[in-house]
Image: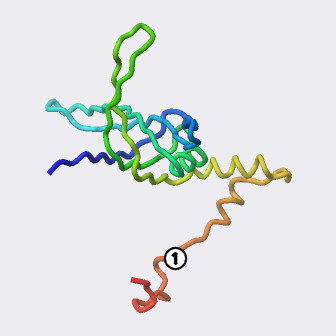
Amino acid sequence: MNLNKVILIGRLTADPDLRTTPSGTHVVSFSIATNRNWTDKDGNKKEETEFHNIVAWGRQADVVNQYSKKGALIMIEGRLQTRSWEDKEGQTRRTTEVIAERIQLGPRAFSQGTAQSKGDDTKSGESDQKKEDEMPVIDLDSDDIKPEDLPF
């Protein structure tokens, strides 16, 4: 049995690059960074960053392009694919990319939503504190929750 499966969780290193093929299919390319932390044999903390090139097609390309920006957290599930081409000097070049099959966007930063709404809002003086006050509060210490009310 063979398996070509990749699962990555990382942050976009730049805004996605959306293109359209001659047949009208959307394709987006972007890069994400993942890091690994460990302690070496001498007890020193180490960190290593890897960069991964991602390609998504169709509706997923549209969603990534619309809702993801540089620094956004994203999970990619897909497969590795290596392609080759000839550069201007006639040299054969190769690159390995992750072809996204499933994409899950990470949580949107609160400041991004606030900055967006401030740009759209004509009222002045709306503060971040007011936005935070609108967030629902869940009281986990309450005795009002009964096992029969749980949906699972």
Label 1 sits on residue: 139
Kind of element beneath mark 1 = loop
User: In which quadrant is the C terminus drawn?
Assistant: bottom left
What is the residue that sits farthest to the front in this orientation?
23
Type of amino acid under label 1: Asp
Tell me if residue 31 comes above or below residue 146 in the rendering: above
Q: Provide residue 73's location: percent of width, then percent of height.
A: 47, 46
Say whether residue 113 is visible: yes
Q: Provide residue 110's location: percent of width, then percent of height.
A: 60, 52
Which quadrant holds residue 31? top left
- Badge 1 crowding class, 10 Å Cα cut-off, few under 14, some 14 to 19, many 20 or more, is few
Residue at screen point 50% across, 88% down: 144
Say whether residue 18 is visible: no
Residue at screen point 38% across, 21% down: 85
Q: Nearer the viewer, residue 37 or 19?
A: 19
Q: Provide residue 143's location: percent of width, then percent of height.
A: 47, 87
Tell me if residue 77 comes above or below residue 39 in the rendering: below
